[in-house]
Amino acid sequence: MIVLIIAGGSGTRLWPLSIPDYPKHLLKINNDKYSLLQNTYLRSKEISNKIYVVSEVSHINYVKE
């Protein structure tokens, strides 16, 4: 199975926590250890080794971390 995680957005719906330069999927909301994107990636690892993350180019360095 191939998992595609779409991690994009303008960061406006959860303002002021989420901003265009650092949107919701990069925030550590559910716990203090992992961001929403990291939690999604970890859950995906349970079902597949083929995981792709699609993100806006301006957030790519955060996603790579």
Image (cartoon, rainbow, N blue to C red):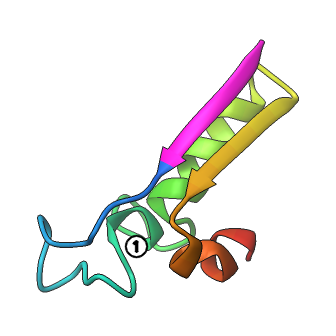
Residue farthest to the right? 49
Q: Residue at x 60, y 57 (%)?
A: 38
Residue at 80% from the left image edge and 22% from the top image edge: 48
The residue located at (64%, 69%) in the rendering is 63
Q: Quadrant of the C terminus?
A: bottom right
Q: Residue at x 62, y 79 (%)?
A: 62
Q: Is residue 33 left or right of residue 32?
A: right
Lateral position of residue 28 relative to residue 1, left or right: left
- The quarter of the picture where residue 59 lies is bottom right
> Magenta stretch?
1-6
Which residue position holds label 1? 27
* Rendering coords of residue 58 (x, y %): 53, 80
Quadrant of the drawing holding the N terminus: top right
Residue 5 lies, in percent from the top left, at 57, 40
- Toward the front, the furthest residue is 57
Residue 3 appears at what percent x and percent y?
Answer: 68, 26
Identify the main secondary structure in magenta: strand
Classed neighbour count for the residue bearing mark 1: other residues with Cα under 10 Å, few (<14), some (14–19), many (≥20): some
Residue 53 in picture, x, y percent from top left: 65, 48
Q: Is residue 28 magenta?
A: no
Relative to 33, does residue 36 appear above or below in the rendering?
above
**Dot 1: element:** loop
